[in-house]
Image (spheres, rainbow, N blue to C red):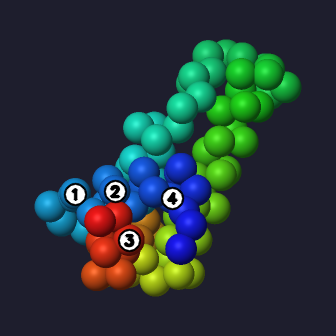
């Protein structure tokens, strides 16, 4: 099974976590694009590139779940997102 760079890195970080985590907690670590200045306009190229990468990370998160490489341990409750852990299949894919 082929994984994108984002999927592989998210899965690696989730697998190393000592307890269930929100996948989005790792987005800043995985996003290779520079974070835009908070005051940059919406059409600023740095902001657009960073935003596109963030959206790709959400897609990668969904892909990991759809392929059952991660499982939701604690569903979102309105105060925090889903907390996940890697499945055995997910861990095996990293070996």
Relative to residue 59, is residue 65 drawn left or right?
A: left
Q: Is 36 on the left-hand or right-hand side of 28?
A: right
Q: Earlier in the sequence, mark 3 or mark 2?
A: 2
Q: So how many labels did they put on this image?
A: 4
| Element under disc 1 | helix
Q: For numbered disc 3, what is the local secondary structure?
A: helix
Residue that label 3 marks: 93
Q: Are marks 4 and 2 in contact (CB under 8 Å)?
A: no
Residue pictured at 53% horizontal, 51% vertical: 6
Q: CA distance from mark 3 to mark 1?
A: 14 Å
Mark toward the viewer: 4 or 3: 3
The residue sitting at the right extreme is 43
Question: Viewer-proximal residue, 18 or 89?
Answer: 89
Q: Nearer the viewer, mark 3 or mark 2?
A: 3
How far is disc 2 from disc 1 in space, using C-alphas? 6 Å
Q: Tell me how far mark 3 sits from mark 2, CA to CA.
A: 10 Å
Q: Report the residue marked by disc 4.
A: 7
Who's the residue at 21% across and 58% down the image? 17
Q: Which residue is mark 2?
A: 12
Rendered image: mark on residue 16: 1
Say if mark 2 contacts mark 1, CB within 8 Å. Answer: yes
């Amino acid at each position: 099974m082929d994984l994108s760079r984002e999927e592989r890195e998210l899965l690696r970080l989730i697998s190393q976590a000592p307890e269930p985590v929100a996948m989005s907690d790792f987005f800043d670590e995985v996003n290779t694009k520079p974070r835009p200045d908070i005051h940059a306009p919406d059409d600023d190229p740095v902001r657009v590139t960073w935003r596109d990468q963030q959206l790709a990370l959400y897609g990668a998160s969904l892909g990991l779940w759809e392929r059952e490489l991660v499982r939701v341990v604690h569903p979102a409750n309105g105060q925090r997102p889903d907390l996940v852990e890697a499945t055995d299949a997910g861990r095996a894919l990293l070996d």
